[in-house]
Image (tube, helix red, strand yellow):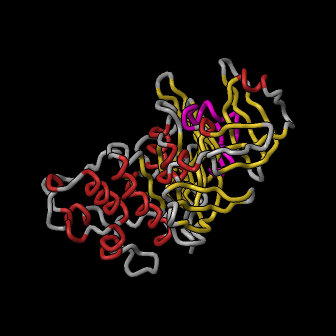
Amino acid sequence: MLTVQIDKKLGDFHLSADFAVRGASITTIFGKSGAGKTSLINAIAGLSRPDTGAIHLGEIPLFDQERGLCLRPHERQIGYVFQDDRLFPHLTVRKNLLYGATPLRGQPTEIKFADVLDLLGIRPLLGRKPNALSGGEKQLVAIGRALLSNPRLLLMDEPLASLDFQRREDILPFIEKIRDEFGVTIIYVSHAIEEVIRLSDEMIILSNGKVAAQGPVDEIMSRLDLHPLTGRFDAGAVISTKFASYDPVYDLGELNFPGGQIQVAGLNMEKGTPLRAHIRARDVSLMTAEPKGSSVLNVFKGRISDVREEDGPQLDLSIDIGVPLIARVTRKSYDNLGLRVGSEVHAMIKAVAIDRRSVGGIKGRGR
C-alpha cells in the first residue's frame, strides 16, 4: 500500500494531499490542468521534496519530514513513465530497455527482460533506434524500461497524451496487463476521462492541489456535486455490467446490470466479460409516461433521487434505475414535466449514443 500525507508550497500554489492506494491496483489521478497532478507524483518519485508530511510504500518510508528522511529517486524502487518517452536517441531499443534495469536475483516477483518483450510485443523492435519508431512504439519501450527497474510502484504521467485515439486504444490493454500479470501498483495521471474509466480500480480527483474525492469510478462519476470537476461535457454515470449476448443480425451487443439490459451498437465480446459503460448525461432523455412507438432501444423506469441546481439553463438529475443514472435537462423541460425529487420517469438512451470505444474493462477482464 502507498500512503501519502504531504504539504508543499510552490510559489502561490499549495499542494496538500492525504490518501492511500492499495497494492496491485491502478489508481488514476484526475484533474484539470493546474490541479497539481504532476507535482504530486513528482513528490512521490522523489523528484521534489515536500515541506512537511510523510510518504510510505508498504513498510518503507520514502519521505518523513519529522525524521529528516528523504530517499533519493533511485532508492525508492519506483518506475516513472513521462508524457514524452525520454529514450536515449543514440541507443537501440535493447540498450534503452536495459538502461537502469535492476535484477532481483531470481526472486519470484522479478520482472525479466523476456517477460517485458512478450507482454508489450516489442521483440521485433530491439535493433532499432528511437528515430525509427512510431509514437506508440516509443511509449511501449518507455513503459518496458520502467518495468525492468522491477518497481514496486509505477508512476505514469499522462503517457498517452501525445498519441492519437487509436494508438491510445492499442496501448491501454498493455497497462492493464502490467497490473494483472506482474501485480505492479500503478498511479496513472490523466485528464482524459475515458482513460480513467477504462483503467481505474479507483480514482482520485485533484482540484487546486487538494484531494476532492477518492473512490471507485462508478461511485465518483455518479456524484452530482463532482460534475464541475469531472467535466460538464463528459459528465455522466458509469455502470458496471457484464457482456450478455450479441445479435449479429443487427450488430448489437447486450450488457446486463442490476437495472436490466443495455444495448450498444457495434459491440461484440466474450460472454461474461465485465465492462464499464459510460453513459453521458447529455445522452439521456426523460419521459413521465412509458414511451410508445419510439426508436430508442434502451428505456428504464426509475425515480429522481437528486437534483443539482446551478446557474444556467440546465439541471443534472440523478435517476435511480437500480443503479444511478444521470440525465441533463433544461430547466424549462423540468418545469413543464412537473419534475421533482421522487418523481417517476422513464429514462431513454439511444443504443447508438453509447460509443462502443468508451466501454471499458474491469480488472480481470472476465477471468
Instruction: Determine the image quadrant of residue 102.
Output: bottom left
Q: Is residue 224 magenta?
A: yes
At a point 55% along the width and 58% down the height, the residue shown is 57
**Can you say whether 70 is above or below 343 in the image?**
below
Whole-percent x, y for residue 163 in the image: 32, 46
Q: Nearer the viewer, residue 104 or 218?
A: 218
Rendered-image quadrant of the N terminus: bottom right
Seen at 45% across and 67% down, the residue is: 177
Residue ranking furthest to the right:
342
Give the quarter of the image for residue 201. Answer: bottom right
Q: Position of residue 29 (x, y in %)?
A: 53, 45
Q: Position of 227 compared to 197: left or right?
A: right
The answer to whether residue 61 is seen in the rendering is: no
Image quarter (top left, top right, bottom left or bottom right) of the C terminus? bottom right
In the rendered image, the vertical position of residue 191 relative to residue 115, given as above or below: above
260, above or below 39, in the image? below
Residue at 36%, 58% (x, y): give it: 170
- Classify residue 292 by image quadrant: top right
The residue lying at 35 percent from left, 45 percent from top is 83
Magenta highlight range? 212-234
Q: Verify whether residue 312 appears in magenta.
A: no
Relative image position of residue 109 (x, y in whole percent): 46, 76
Q: Is residue 28 something one can see in this rendering?
A: yes
